[in-house]
Amino acid sequence: MKDKEISDYYDATFDRDVRSDLQQAIKLVYEPKIAIDCGCGAGRDIEYLLDHGFVVHAFDIETDSIVRCKKRFDGKDNVFLSQDGFNSFSYPHSSLVLADASLFFCPEGEFNEVWSKINKSLSPGGVFVGSFLGPGDTMANPGYRKELFWPDVLVFNEVELRSKFNKFEIINWTEHNLDGTTEQGRLHHWHIFSIIAKKI
């Protein structure tokens, strides 16, 4: 995705509605309320978590994201921001890990290590809430114009994905398989697994 498209995406999602999965997930979290936002974008979910009493550690690989979030949360002492990728981020102990439409872009060869880090960061009873790309998604199609969004995406089928959650109690598992549009207005077929799970 080009810099302008990234910037346009952040503009479009600055005040978007918070997804229902996150609203449900925070009700499952006990003290201390410490969240990690993986791929924080324009910071809408950070703001929501702060409003619900969380300390938030957030990262994104994009410079524009971190610049925007530093401005948005200037003076907040319960937000910790860093420009990092999934594998370079230092995951603190947490009670909630949020990865909304971000692990799509974790390099395939790094995922197992990243997933291990996420698991280790979550305290027993901690909650993971996030989404994964399914094989029917437009971005998973070999003929997709990768220059429009991202050169490589991480794809799981349901069997593969369920095996990653063998140390979790599944609270909610929803498979979305529908036509729609991207934030940039492009036609897109979405195939996404949205998951809320509690670490055993």
Image (cartoon, rainbow, N blue to C red):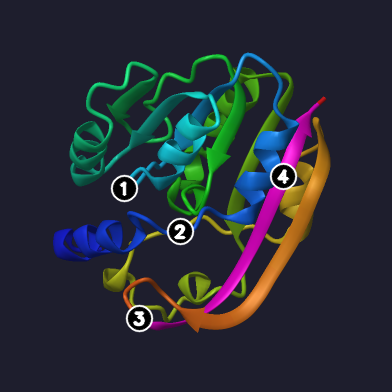
**Residue under pointer 1:** 42
Count of picture labels: 4
**Residue under pointer 2:** 153
Q: Does residue 116 appear in the picture of this structure? A: yes
Residue that sits furthest to the front in the current view: 51
Instruction: Determine whether, in the image, residue 126 is placed left or right of residue 103.
Output: right
**Against 118, is 189 above or below?**
below
Query: Separation of disc 3 and disc 1 at Cα?
Result: 18 Å
Q: Who comes first in sequence, dot 3 or dot 4?
A: 3
Q: Main secondary structure of the magenta part?
A: strand
Query: Separation of disc 2 and disc 1 at Cα?
Result: 21 Å
Q: Position of residue 42 (x, y in %)?
A: 31, 48
Q: Position of residue 78 (x, y in %)?
A: 39, 18
Comparing labels 2 and 4, the label whose residue is closer to the camera: 4
Mark 3, secondary structure of its residue: loop
Amino acid at the residue labelled 1: Ala
Q: Who comes first in sequence, dot 2 or dot 1?
A: 1
Q: Who comes first in sequence, dot 1 or dot 4?
A: 1
Mark 4, secondary structure of its residue: strand
**Against 186, is 5 above or below?**
above
Magenta stretch, residue numbers = 186-199
Which numbered tag is attached to residue 196? 4
Q: Who comes first in sequence, dot 3 or dot 2?
A: 2
